Amino acid sequence: MNNDIWAKVLAALKGTLGANNFSNWIEPLEFLHLNGGVATFNVPTNFIGNYVNQNFSDQIIYQLNKQGQDVQRVKFTVPSQAAAKPVVRKVAAADDIAGSPIDARFTFDNFIVGKPNELAHAAARRVAEGGPVTFNPLFLYGGVGLGKTHLMHAIAHELQRRSPDLNVLYLSAEQFMYRFITALRERKMMDFKQLFRSVDVLMVDDVQFMAGKDSTQEEFFHTFNALIDGQKQIIISADRAPGEIKDLEERIKSRLQCGLVVDLHPTDYELRLGILQSKVDYYATQYTELQIAPGVLEFLAHRISTNVRVLEGALTRLFAFASLVGREITLELTQDCLSDVLKASDRKVTVEEIQRKVSEHYNIRLSDMIGPKRLRTYARPRQIAMYLAKRMTNRSLPEIGRRFGGRDHTTVMHGVRRIEELKVLDSQIADDLELLRRALEE
């Protein structure tokens, strides 16, 4: 097997496993030889070899066979110290081996700003300007595909552009854990501590994955404190607010909340339309022969509303398909090409799903929430469930009332109005509503 084949396998694995898994576990592999159906690879440590064998060996074998190679199993070996390549010990910039690679596509120039993300964008811009630390840490949170990672990469790009000598370290929470575990196994904790305490800017993506990992949290806490004390900037992202991350130590939650915590809200129609138009302008340079009929972008912006990645992926597929068949991108072609995506986006939330999710969130029995009890412990969750039922289903007020123990429609109306008032006055209610909405749309 030659290097060109392995390069194709690597490209396929990166697309299948995602950038974080690829950089953490697949990129360190060095192909040695294929003999008797066994593909052998060099790995930096036994830990990496064991992890890849347990989690990704099937994918590697599948992709190798797809390239015409007869592979039944994979084998991992750790080269001897004499033969091993020297390990780079310097603190690296964002795009060096010390951290995850920075995606060149994710810059401030191509980040579409709208009302749902304008605060997060402004905060990210401020941090990217460098200079004296204004708020530390900057904590960005939101659901999948709302732009957290885009802003993280954009900050790293801008910091490196303004100050090339700045030590900016960007990595995922999984990569932080992997480096910590490897340092423990190889008894190189001093190197680990020196690396993470010597950076000027530390960026950690998806910090919620540290939840429940006590030893990793301990080291992260000490690293966090050392950098804060040294006036070094920290930027964190997660899929939820610090206080909502279950099994994360309270002292870490407190630390994460001591800076600026910014929520990237779900996109609105205008923002989604702007994102689509930006992508069309980009594709126009690649598919010069294609035409897109009026109303197509508006249709997509209305129908695909929860995830920007899905929205952009749908447009990419649409342009590729239209190019292959040599047809104009009409509404009919769009519906045919994206039928599966549109069907998934049309999933209807039921009142019963809302009731179950709300009762689980507030740790009360479903029968108590629907029943006649008027204690605030049950009344407030009941009103929240009514509010979500009104906003997320097409059921009428009388229908919703019937599903809440036969209550009158005026009771439902009162509950909806009360929650409308409280979500402006009470940040906890607002956070609960957002968390429940995301959970119901998954």
Image: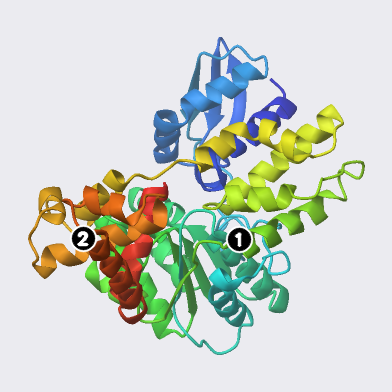
* The N terminus, quarter of image: top right
Q: Position of residue 134 (x, y in %)?
A: 50, 88
Given residues 308 and 261, the one toward you in this image is 308
Q: Position of residue 111 (x, y in %)?
A: 67, 65
Given residues 48 and 122, the one toward you in this image is 122
Q: Is residue 230 above or below residue 41?
A: below
Q: Position of residue 76 (x, y in %)?
A: 48, 28
Q: Is residue 81 above or below residue 263?
A: above
Q: How many marks?
A: 2
Going 37% across and 78% down the picture, which residue do you hit? 424
- Asked if labels 1 and 2 touch by Cβ distance under 8 angstroms, the answer is no
The residue labelled by disc 1 is: 269
Q: Secondary structure at mark 2?
A: helix
Q: Is residue 220 above or below residue 213?
A: below
The answer, for residue 29, to whether it is visible in the render is no
Which residue is most to the right?
A: 289
**Mark 2 is on which residue type?**
Arg
The residue labelled by disc 2 is: 382
Going 55% across and 58% down the picture, which residue do you hit? 99
* Classed neighbour count for the residue bearing mark 1: other residues with Cα under 10 Å, few (<14), some (14–19), many (≥20): some
**Mark 1 is on which residue type?**
Tyr
Q: CA distance from mark 2 to mark 1?
A: 29 Å
Q: Is 421 left, or right, of 344 in this rendering?
A: left
Going 9% across and 65% down the picture, which residue do you hit? 374
Q: Earlier in the sequence, mark 2 or mark 1?
A: 1
Going 35% across and 71% down the picture, which residue do you hit? 430
* Classed neighbour count for the residue bearing mark 2: other residues with Cα under 10 Å, few (<14), some (14–19), many (≥20): many
Q: Secondary structure at mark 1?
A: helix
Q: Is 77 left, or right, of 280 in this rendering?
A: left
Q: Position of residue 325 (x, y in %)?
A: 83, 27
Residue 170 picture quarter: bottom right
The answer, for residue 77, to whether it is visible in the render is yes
